[in-house]
Image (spheres, rainbow, N blue to C red):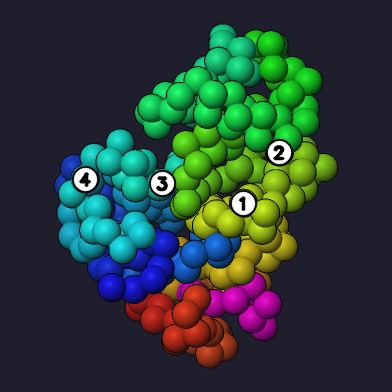
Amino acid sequence: MSDAELELQGVRSGYGDLTVIRDITFAVPPGNITVLLGRNGAGKTTLLKTIAGLIQASAGDIQIGGASVAKEPPYLRQRRGLGFVQENKRIFKRRSVEDNLRMGAYASKLSRKEVTARMAEAYERFAVLGAKRKDVAGYLSGGEQQMLAISQALMSHPRLLLLDEPSAGLAPSIVQDVLDAVRRIKEEEGRTVLMVEQSVDLAISVADHVLVLDIGRIVHSGRPDDTGIREIVEDTYFGRTAATAKAAAPAASGPDGSSAGAAAPA
Ligand code: ATP
C-alpha cells in the first residue's frame, strides 16, 4: 500500500459508449497541490468526477488514503475524506451564507457545536464570508461565491480537496485571493489538493506538481519549474500531438521522484 493521499491506476471512464479518459495513472502525496492542466475538452472535469464517484470508472483502480474506492458511491468517498468543488455548481443561491455552510456539514453528522466551530473556521479563512454571513448567497460576487463553495466543501474537513477550475470567470485580482486561500488550505490546514486549471501561469504559481491531460491521457507529469513546461502545455493547447509534446519534455519526475510515466497517444 502506498502512502499517497490519492492514487489512480489505469483508470478509464466516460459517458455511455464514449470513452473520455483512459489509462490514467498518477499519485498525489499528502500535503501536495497537484494541478491538472489541459485544453477544453481534454477530459479534466470527467477525471475529477470519476475520482469523486459521480461517474463510474469502467477500468482501473482509485485509492483514497490507501483504500480502494472505485466501486464506492460518492458519499462513501466523502466519508473517506474527499471534498469536491465542482465548476459552476457552486452554491445554493437563495440560501444565506450560513445556511450554505451548514449544508456543507450535513453529511458529516456533526454536533451543533462542531458545526459552529467549523463555520468560525470558514469566517477566519475568508473574512468577507463572516461579514456577509446573513446575506443571500446569490448576491455575493463571483469571487465570494467561489470562496463560499470552497468553504462549504471544507466543512467536512476533507483530507483531499478536488477543485474544478476555481479561477473560472473571476477577475485577476480575485483569482489571486482564491489561489492564496488554496495555498493556505495546504500549508496551514495540511490538506491535499488536486485542482484543474487552464492557465499555465496560474498553475505554475500554486502547484507542487503539474499533470497535463490531452485527449483523455496524461501526456506530462512533472514539477512546475521544469524547463519546457510552457511549451509542453502550448503543444497540447494548439493541438500539436502528444508525441511531439513528450519529445519536447525534459526528464520529468513524478510526485514521488519517479519518472513521469507519460502515456503515449493511441
Ligand atoms: P473544459 O476545460 O472545457 O471544462 P474538460 O477538459 O474539463 O474541458 P470534459 O468536460 O471532461 O473536459 O469533457 C471531455 C469530453 O467529454 C468532451 O468531448 C465533452 O464533450 C464530453 N462530455 C462531457 N460531459 C459529457 C456528458 N455529460 N455526456 C457526454 N459527453 C460528455
Which of label 1 and label 4 is nearer to you? Answer: 1
Dot 1, crowdedness within 10 Å: few (<14), some or many (≥20)? few
Q: Secondary structure at mark 3?
A: strand
Mark 2 CB in 8 Å range of ligand 1? no
Residue 241 position, x and y percent, is 45, 73
- Identify residue type, mark 4: Glu
Q: Residue at x 77, y 43 (%)?
A: 177
- Give the mark nearest the N terminus, 2 or 4: 4
Residue 33 position, x and y percent, is 57, 61
Q: Secondary structure at mark 4?
A: loop
> On the picture, is 206 further left or further right than 171?
left
Report the residue marked by disc 4.
72
Residue 226 colored in magenta in the image: yes
Report the residue marked by disc 2.
125
Report the residue marked by disc 3.
82
Report the residue marked by disc 1.
189
**Cα distance in 3D space between marks 3 and 4:** 12 Å
Q: Farthest residue toward the bottom?
A: 251
- Identify residue type, mark 2: Arg
Q: Residue at x 47, y 52 (%)?
A: 160
The segment highlighted magenta reads 220-229
Mark 4 CB in 8 Å range of ligand 1? no
Q: Secondary structure at mark 2?
A: helix
Q: Residue at x 56, y 11 (%)?
A: 95
